[in-house]
Image: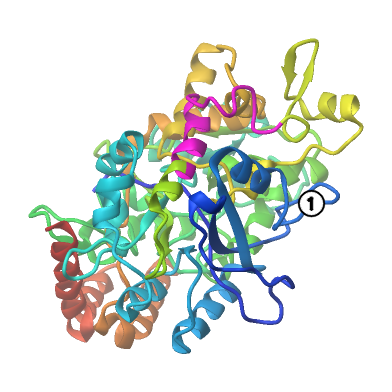
Amino acid sequence: MKKSLSLLLSLVVSVGILAACSNEEADSDQVSEEDGPVTITTARVLDDGTVFKDGENVHDNVVTRWAEEELGIKFVTEWTQPNDEQFNTQLRLMMSSREKLPDVFLVSNNSIKADLIESGLVRSIDDVIEEHATPRIKELFERFPEAFYPSTNENGEIFGVPRYSGGNGSDTLLWIRQDWLDKFDLEAPETLEELEHIMEVFVHEDPNETGRDDTIGITFAAGDQGFRGGNIADSAWVFGAFGDYVPGNWSQGEDGSLVYGSIQPNVKDGLAKINEWYEKGYLATDFAILSAGDAQESFISGRSGIMAAPPWAHGYPIGEIEQVIPDAVVKPFPHVTGPNGDAGRRGEGLIVGSFLFNSEFEYFDKFFEYWDTILGYPLGESDHFPYGLFEGYDYVMKDGEPIYNIAEFEEITGEDHVDPGRYFLPTNIPTIPYEMYGLLEEFHETGRDPVNGYEANLAGRHPDYIEAAAIVNKQNDIRIVNEFSGPPTDTMSSRSEHLERLEDETFVDIIYGNKPISTFDQFVEEWLASGGETITQEVNEWYDSVRN
């Protein structure tokens, strides 16, 4: 229902074999602490977003040296891949050839995760969590038990340590052209009815002053995943304004079991409303086939004045509007309520992956020591990182005070500011669900000064981003999360393509007015009869197994 537990704490690791991977071979033998640092092998996605200082690389950088000198851990990256798809392909090749896996590695794909668990190449970790996890980590695990569901087998054994997401980091809110609102003396909308009035004005009163009938009310995109996912130009909040379910999500029904959102009555109400908007000219005529990337152009180019997107969209794509319309003013607003006072948005998942460990890995004490140490940084509880991560990388000292401002940093040092957080095994500074946006809300509401490097980085963000994060955090109670986080069930594997096509075609036909709204009831019956009823049973069998 309207809740969310989403987690994001990372560690990236695996072993190498393919050509496009690391050129350097690594000694994967584990060494005892008595003989020197413990060696832990890993592999990771290494994309263009990770920038190293001159002379440093994934094998030798400020983080790897710190881990070896301060914690006695020598991390050896055996191979890298530039994206998740190639990373997953390499894992599958290693699994099929029964090649030894890295000591610890991040897996985001639930199907691969399930196959690895079944293969016997990775080990269960129930015992090591109890023995080696620190109190701080155990408390985090207890707070978000759902984070373990994707890496729990049918016998209830846990195999993966969750890499947490921000919890609500990619949840949406409404971005609206404030200059258009001001032009027509319009107030911020709080209800669907008020939003509709704004769209009516945006469509018919020539807000972009071109003298042509060339504007739409709102930007939607349904060309990527239909109505089942996405965040840029998402429409889930329309369905959430009529009840507790959104298309594509498996959420708790009244009896506590999981039900498929796309077949719930409030989705029918949402489709009727979007059809009404389409008929009034509020939507682009081709929105059903537009990807998010294509659809966002209507907002950036000034044809649309409203679009749903997460706070981080302030920089891109929303920030791109400044290059096209320098005088445009875009502001963040909460999601509106429906006729019965309901509001709802699609909630981000709890995790973005799980860290798995090869069956021979032993040094869990060192792994949890490492994780606990870097986890302390965003919590403001770190003895290792009192000012920032590493001086000369993300901050510099001047007159005894840390300088975080990037421009001032680069002027003082004569070097580029880099993000050493990307060097850690989590591929970024660890996150804890709801903590970051909670801090940003606090900065927005109180204006207090940051007390460490992590907070300074957040407090230095653009004011509109901070306000957007605060809005999202205040509306956490309207989150509608997908509570099915297991691998595809047997019937999903054979029937999902047909069922998704049925869903997409039905929804678009209703919105475009090709079929009456009563077609939704026929769709529900056909969905259940064509495999949906069996899928629902399988999903709940999985749900029962991971909770018990």
Q: Which residues are magenta?
A: 370-390
Q: Quadrant of residue 462?
A: top right
Q: Position of residue 537 (x, y in %)?
A: 14, 74
Q: Amino acid at mark 1?
A: Glu
Q: Circle 1 is placed at which residue position? A: 56
Decide whether residue 373 is among the magenta residues: yes
The residue at 27%/59% (across/down) is 149
Left or right of residue 58, residue 247 in this image: left
Residue 241 in sight: no
Q: Position of residue 520 (x, y in %)?
A: 26, 70
Which of 171/542 is in front?
A: 542
**Location of residue 331 in the rendering, given as x and y in whole percent from the top left corner:** 60, 32
- Of all residues, the one furthest to the left in this rendering is 255
Q: Residue at x 47, y 28 (%)?
A: 379
- 388 with respect to 210 (left or right): left
**Any magenta on residue 472?**
no
Side of 83 relative to 224 (left or right): right
Q: How many marks?
A: 1
Q: What is the x, y in percent for residue 546?
A: 19, 61
